[in-house]
Image: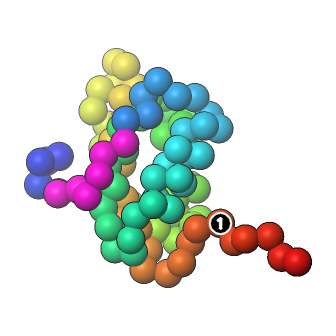
Amino acid sequence: MTGAIVTDTELDITGEVCPMTTVHVRLALDRLPGGAILGVTLTGDEPHHNVASAVRALGHQIVLDETLSRASDLYRLVIRKSQARTSASPPSA
């Protein structure tokens, strides 16, 4: 049911490996306004687990978590960005 959820932006990180998968998702979320929907396509069990864990730890909601292909470990996450400010804080003085 991938087509049922309309995303504000899509991110394909199938060519990335940990920890860069989480970094790319974090940067994409930082660019979006609160409540926006980000679709992420990624490869591998470890990146899938790590990205999902990081997204939840940051307070965002995973709206959809689906396996696109078990044979190639291809996954898709659809994430709703939290309304709260979650971008990295500037360094303190």
* Residue 70 in the image, given as x and y percentages of width and height: 34, 25
Residues in magenta, as a range: 6-11
* Residue 28 in the image, given as x and y percentages of width and height: 46, 53
Which residue ends up furthest to the top in the rendered image?
71
Which residue ends up furthest to the bottom in the rendered image?
84
Q: What scheme was used to colour the molecule?
A: rainbow
Q: Quadrant of the C terminus?
A: bottom right
* Residue 27 in the image, given as x and y percentages of width and height: 53, 53
| Circle 1 residues within 10 Å: few <14, some 14–19, many ≥20 | few
Report how many numbered discs are placed on residues in the image.
Answer: 1
* Residue drawn at 30 percent across, 46 percent down: 10
Q: Which residue is mark 1?
A: 88
**Three-letter amino acid code at the position of disc 1:** Ala
Q: Is residue 5 left or right of residue 24?
A: left
Is residue 63 visible to us here? no
Is residue 30 visible to us here? yes
Above or below 84: residue 1: above
Q: Is residue 25 left or right of residue 71?
A: right
* Residue drawn at 29 percent across, 26 percent down: 69
Disc 1 secondary structure class: loop
Q: Is residue 44 left or right of residue 37?
A: right
The one of 6 and 33 positioned closer to us in this rendering? 33
